[in-house]
Amino acid sequence: MLNLAQWKMKHENYVLKTNWKKLILANRLKENMVIQVWSIQVDQKLCLAVVRI
């Protein structure tokens, strides 16, 4: 499970607070890669999809 939180700074930022290292490893993400995070609802559960750009 991932926890998504909003950080209020100059612009609105969203951050993954827990288990983000598992997401990085599972998707082979590297520094400076650009991704999109999409939210979808499946069976009344909020799900996130990660897409590399």
Image (spheres, rainbow, N blue to C red):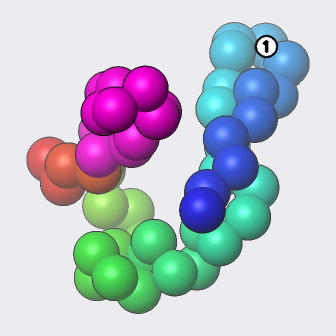
At horizontal 45% and vertical 72% (from top left) the residue drawn is: 23
Instruction: Look at the image and say whether residue 41 sits in the magenta stretch.
Output: yes
Query: Which quadrant would residue 31 be assigned to in this image?
Result: bottom left
Q: Please tell me whether the stretch drawn in magenta is mainly helix, strand or loop.
A: strand
The residue under label 1 is: 10
Is residue 37 visible in the rendered structure shown here?
no
Q: Is residue 1 left or right of residue 17?
A: left
At horizontal 65% and vertical 72% (from top left) the residue drawn is: 19
Q: Residue furthest left?
A: 53
Q: Residues within 10 Å of mark 1 (few under 14, many from 20)?
A: few
Q: Which quarter of the rendered picture does the N terminus lie within?
A: bottom right
Q: Position of residue 50 (x, y in %)?
A: 29, 50
Mark 1 residue type: Lys
Q: Residue furthest top?
A: 11
At horizontal 39% and vertical 62% (from top left) the residue drawn is: 32
Q: Secondary structure at mark 1?
A: loop
Q: Position of residue 34 (x, y in %)?
A: 30, 50
Identify which residue, 36 or 32, lies in the foreground: 36
At horizontal 34% and vertical 32% (from top left) the residue drawn is: 43
8 relative to 14, above or below:
above
Identify which residue, 17 or 9, lies in the foreground: 17
Q: Position of residue 38 (x, y in %)?
A: 32, 32
Is residue 6 visible in the rendered structure shown here?
yes
Q: Position of residue 28 (x, y in %)?
A: 28, 82
How many marks do you count on the picture? 1
Instruction: Look at the image and say whether residue 22 sits in the magenta stretch.
Output: no
- What segment carries the magenta color? 36-49
Q: Is residue 36 left or right of residue 13?
A: left
Q: Is residue 52 left or right of residue 3?
A: left
Identify which residue, 47 or 29, lies in the foreground: 47
Q: Residue furthest right?
A: 8
